[in-house]
Image: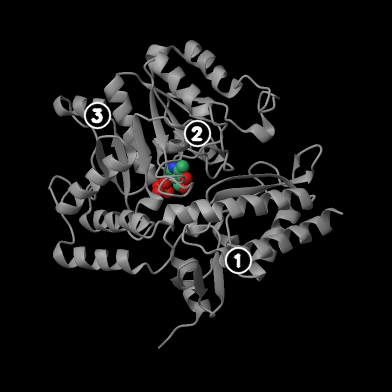
Amino acid sequence: MDRSSAEIIKENRDYTLFPWAVQGSYSPIHLVRGEGVWFWDGEGNKWLDLCSQLINLNIGHGNRKVIEAIKRQADALCFAGPGFATEPRGRLGKKLAEVTGLAKAFYTLGGTEANESAMKIARTYTGRPKIITRYRSYHGDTMGSMSAGGDYRRWPVEPGVPGMVRVFDPYCYRCPFGKTVDSCARECVSHIEEVIQLEGPHRIAAMLAEGITGTNGVLVPPDDYFPRLRALLDKYGILLIDDEVMAGFGRTGKWLATQHYGIKPDIVTCAKGLTSGYMPLGAVIVSQEIADYLETNMLWTGLTFSGHPVSCAAALATLEFYEEAEVFANVEEQGAHLGRRLESMKERYACVGDVRYKGLFSMIEFVRDKASKEPLAPYAGTSPEMAAFAAYLRSRYVHTYLRFNVCFVAPPLIITRDELDYGLDIVEEGLAEVDKLLA
Ligand SMILES: Cc1ncc(COP(=O)(O)O)c(C=O)c1O
């Protein structure tokens, strides 16, 4: 007998814990099925997904190519221990080397473990203990990657894992150095040199940085940020670990966000768009130099499910789909349109302080007052106005990700112009509601 949606939600709430939520005040949507950029809840409502679930469902729901690849691999060989060679494992490694320009991949189950392993590899390779990260960053949910992340989610696990050194971000709208992007001397990079000096260059293994910062507000850096950072790190023999978990695999229109800036990291970590979430998979991809080192030195990391054949097959099919369907060209086209519409929102709505975007990776930053830039909700908090905006979107069945005073717009990369406009029109109606509250 079919059970009601309310019963299913109740069972979920009674017997499972939802992440990053105070359980008693969390009300999940009962997700039943999905098609492309749309999904349906248990009461038959059709939702537009403007944030690709958790900014991972790049190819949208129901992609037959990937589903068939998963089925074929499950029939052929559903599991192999992490020490075995399999065809999908090797083929995916070769493809990842090709698209990143690096050499070899170690597979994990997601982004958190990828960063965890990357930091371990960097420490053993350099023989140095410390990792530089940025305050407005998130790198995952284990003790190590959580300690590396700079945002408020680390607070409950503090003091966490020692050896993390944090620096400021290229957050040009609220520059921590009080500068403007046109006239600054890129203090967001130059202050890192002072930190390196004070911490001891010979004690720092790597800097871990998101290619474009995601959950902490889509902080698109100035074009010369990464080239300058790469040069600085090279000066001191410090590795660059590029966390592409959220920004990678076409989200910004390229395989890696850092490819927009013409630099090559020493290590790339990825997950999310690697399989679009169809199967759990993350990867750490290392440079030739590190791969050579590992020829004669131990790799001090391993997981039972590393190199899962079904996950690797799903990733291969996903990457093939990106190319065959020319998904990145769509990102460029729809991303340009998205950028124009966001800029127009910034002009027209009092509550919009800033908009930031690259490809289909974007957000709207809300302010109480454009001149003072007072955020419409405090850091790590919310406000009646942000809650009203969220409620409006929900009432119109538009799903997106809101955090403090920021709303993300990061739809599946296969979105059409009409679908995008449909969602953005509703976002604009929500902005008008917020403006009424502020008037
Ligand atoms: C930049 C970044 N790194 C790492 C992670 C952690 O990845 P996962 O949730 O797959 O463990 C995330 C998750 O959102 C992320 O955005």
Q: Is 79 located above or below residue 266 in the figure?
A: below
Relative side of 28 to 86, left or right: right
Q: How many marks?
A: 3
Q: Disc 1 marks which residue?
A: 398
Tell me the residue at 66%/64% (across/down): 393
State which quarter of the image contains the C terminus.
bottom right
Which amino acid type is shown beneath numbered disc 1?
Val
Q: State which quadrant residue 396 falls in.
A: bottom right
Q: Which residue is mark 3?
A: 288
Specify the color scheme: one colour
**Of marks 3 and 2, the one in the foreground:** 3
Mark 2, residue position: 158
Q: Quadrant of residue 264?
A: top left
Disc 3, SS:
helix
**Label 1 SS:** strand
Q: Dot 1, crowdedness within 10 Å: few (<14), some or many (≥20)?
A: many
Q: Amino acid at mark 2?
A: Glu
**Residue nearest the observer in this picture, 3 or 209:** 209
What's the residue at 44%, 57% (across, down)? 58
- Picture quarter with ligand 1: top left
Q: Residues within 10 Å of mark 3 (few under 14, many from 20)?
A: some
Q: Identity of the amino acid at label 3?
A: Gln
